[in-house]
Amino acid sequence: MIDSTGVETSAASAAGPEASGAEAAVSLLQVVADPVRWAVLQQLAAQPSCVCNLQEHVPIPANLLSYHLKVLREAGLVTSSRRGRWIDYALAPDALKRLHAALPGAAHPAGAEP
């Protein structure tokens, strides 16, 4: 969409904060919709892990696992910390809360007024 000054804007910014919030929710849900990332999240929800342990439960090549971990880190769902040569991954403290909030109707529970 092009605004009155001739600058291209996204539909979210033109529609207001509700649309950008919806787009953020959809983006977050798209991140976890991938089966590999879902499997990684399941493992990390059980306990923090290094890549070598994750590979035992998510049998994909190391470069693909690194890519999926990067996507999860960029989405803020996973944290990483260095331990010597190893990098440990864990579910972000607010990951479950953010995922729940991204679901339709989560912001306004049944019976509550918006």
Image (cartoon, rainbow, N blue to C red):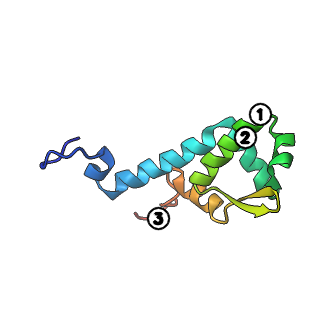
Q: Which residue is mark 2?
A: 65
Q: Secondary structure at mark 2?
A: helix
Few, some or many residues within 10 Å of mark 1 (<14, 14–19, 20+): few
* Front: mark 3 or 1: 1
Q: Which residue is mark 3?
A: 112
Q: Which residue is mark 1?
A: 61
Q: Are marks 3 and 2 in contact (CB under 8 Å)?
A: no
Few, some or many residues within 10 Å of mark 2 (<14, 14–19, 20+): some
Amino acid bearing label 3? Ala
Distance Cα–Cα, label 3 vs label 2? 41 Å
Q: Are marks 1 and 2 in contact (CB under 8 Å)?
A: yes
Res 10 → quadrant = top left
Image position, residue 71 (x, y; %)? 60, 46
Choose the circle earlier in sequence order: 3 or 1. 1
Above-or-below relation of 68 to 24: above
Residue 60 as seen in the image, left or right of residue 70 = right
Distance Cα–Cα, label 1 vs label 2? 6 Å
Give the camera-side residue of 66 and 23: 66
**Most extreme residue toward the front, as rendered?**
85
Give the camera-side residue of 24 and 70: 70
Image position, residue 5 (x, y; %)? 13, 49
Image position, residue 7 (x, y; %)? 19, 46
Amino acid bearing label 2? Leu
Q: Secondary structure at mark 3?
A: loop
Choose the circle earlier in sequence order: 3 or 2. 2
Q: Residue at x 54, y 58 (%)?
A: 101
Residue 80 as seen in the image, left or right of residue 24 = right
Q: Residue at x 63, y 55 (%)?
A: 77
